[in-house]
Amino acid sequence: MSGAAPRVWAPNAKTRVDVVLDDRRVPMERTDGGWWKGPAGTLQHGTDYAFSIDGGEPRPDPRSPWQPAGPHGRSRWLEHAKHTWRDGGWRPPSWESAVLYELHIGTFTPTGTFDGAIERLDDLARLGVTHLELMPVGEFPGRVGWGYDGVDIYAPEHAYGGPEGLKRFVDAAHERGLAVLLDVVYNHFGPDGNYLMEFGPYLTDRYHTPWGDAVNLDGPGSDHVRRFFIDNAFQWLRDYHMDGLRLDAVHTLIDTSAVPFLEQLATEVDGLEAELGRPVVIVAESDQNDPRIVRPLDQHGLGLDAQWSDDFRHALHVTLTGEQDGIHGDFTGIDDLCVALRDVFVFGGKPSTFRKREHGRPVGDLPRSRFVGFLQNHDQIGNRAYGERSANLLGRDALKVAAAIVLLGPLVPLLFQGEEWGAQTPFLYFTDHQDPALAAGVREGRRRDFAAFLGAEGEVPDPQDRKSFERSRLDWDERGHAPHAELLDWHRRLIGLRREVPGLAAGPLPEVSCDPAAGWLTVERSGTLLVANLGDDAASVNLPGGDQRWRLELASHENIVGPSPTEGRVVLPPMTVAMLLERSG
């Protein structure tokens, strides 16, 4: 008989588990390890089904591949082999040459769907980015959301276009030479539609996180919980042809195992990579400043491919804005920016005033391709009271300097949607919880969080207000107007230069010089020299290697002077940047 046999891990079931089909309840058989199995051929492509524990209410499959009616509805069986892929022979651009572009499907286009996003892929290809990073797309409650409160982590959000819509998107991206990474959330589950604990010990009260009980990675039943997440990773990489994953907040994965979950994930993904015959990357978000996350397994690391560097962002942001609230108070400006450019982590084992303890560990000689740098991302914008982007806080010249430092710097660069043209639309925190008590809790929590943080004045936008979502949609028409068109052209030129000049790829350790008092810095690596003046006065910068070594390749201002054949220096007006390349011959 064709079709699949339903299976579910439900060790909490006392007497029975039924698979629910329409109004029928078909008994399942208990097997080893808390697993239950139903009759062969029960699930055909498109079959709606649910599970009942000990005669209780029907619940979605914890591994549901499709939730067409949302997280509270029934699951729909999906046979991935039904999709015909068009990306045969696809291989992503190298990670060292990557330019990442983070986007949120719901606000990226007016339709807020995978198909709507496909219509803008040519714009991203012309921009020159290489890797798209989708914010989480797992089924979440309500009509809109960031995606970090999902509960059906195997099921692409039905409002975005479901499984087939996501596959069309990945296919279309690959057709244009764009790799696709997916942001996944393995550190907690959302509260709305979360029935997992009825099935088994997915959570543990032995540890606590900002979201409540921690995911069970090292207690009784944790082998199966780990398998739940690793199989999810395999699904995205194998069945959806994703080119990598970004793991949300791995510092909240509390795990005392001899072989940590992240190491197990990295090891098994390495095996899958060999099976797929193409490279994939696993990127972590962590606030621990711990380079062991990205050290190779044979060097006693956890073996992930890269991690975000918040220190780089904070140092750059403070240098340009002067903000000193919250964690920004740990950063002093251009001197810390120079440390971040040279050493990645500003806090590599030194005291943090914000944390009231020593923080971090030195990166050492790890390739800089193992770290992602950015000026802004969804968190750094959306976790401000009013969702202000850097373009709302900085002028055109400062945005150009920031873009050059990010895109021509030593780390793998990341842009957030609309950053390339200085989008003025905010990116607010928005939710659509259907439970009134939960909605009220989110609303009040947001107000409380910003009562004395980030200079919030007046009423903080309500995440549950539909306007918070609608205001966050990108306005693509901005690109045709000043100063947006100029900023877009600048980003294209920077990315084009990064692509054309091999020495600008991430990896090699840079040589960094700076004069905090004068406001300038230089970053030299592999025959390239970035010179930036972030001060209020013009700066004359002596260049390494004498008067014949460098030629000016790209400048943010027409009044940047040099280097001349007889003077080994360059003169930059305030808040400008230049890229110089070694002269050939």
Image (spheres, grey):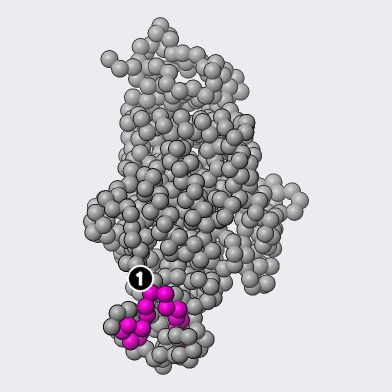
* Residue 145: quadrant of the picture: bottom right
Answer few, some or many: residues within 10 Å of disc 1's Cα (few below 14, many 20 plus, some between 14 and 19).
Answer: some
**Residue 478 spot, x, y in % from top left:** 61, 39
Task: Find disc 1 in the rendering and name its residue.
Answer: 79
Q: Nearer the viewer, residue 511 or 464?
A: 464
**Count of numbered labels shown in the rendering:** 1
**What segment is highlighted magenta in the picture?**
38-53
Above or below residue 339? Residue 267 is: below
Residue 323 seen by the camera: no
In the foreground, 387 or 112: 112
Q: Identify the residue at horizontal 45%, vertical 70% (top origin).
A: 66
Q: Position of residue 325 (x, y in %)?
A: 63, 44
- Whether residue 2 sits left or right of residue 61 in the image: it is left
**Quarter in which the C terminus is drawn:** top left
- Residue lying furthest top in this view? 566
Helix or strand or loop: what does disc 1 sit on? loop
Q: Is residue 472 above or below residue 262?
A: above
Q: Reply above or below: 436 against 416.
A: below
In the image as oriented, which residue stretches furthest toward the right?
458
Viewed as shown, does residue 133 lie left or right of 277?
right
Tell me which amino acid carries mark 1: Glu
Horizontal side, residue 463 vs residue 89: left or right = right
Q: Residue at x 69, y 60 (%)?
A: 465
Residue 240 image position (x, y, % from top left): 37, 60
- Residue at 60 percent across and 19 percent down: it is 537
Secondary structure mostly taken by the magenta-highlighted segment of the chain: loop
Q: Quadrant of the N terminus?
A: bottom left
Q: Residue at x 50, y 84 (%)?
A: 58
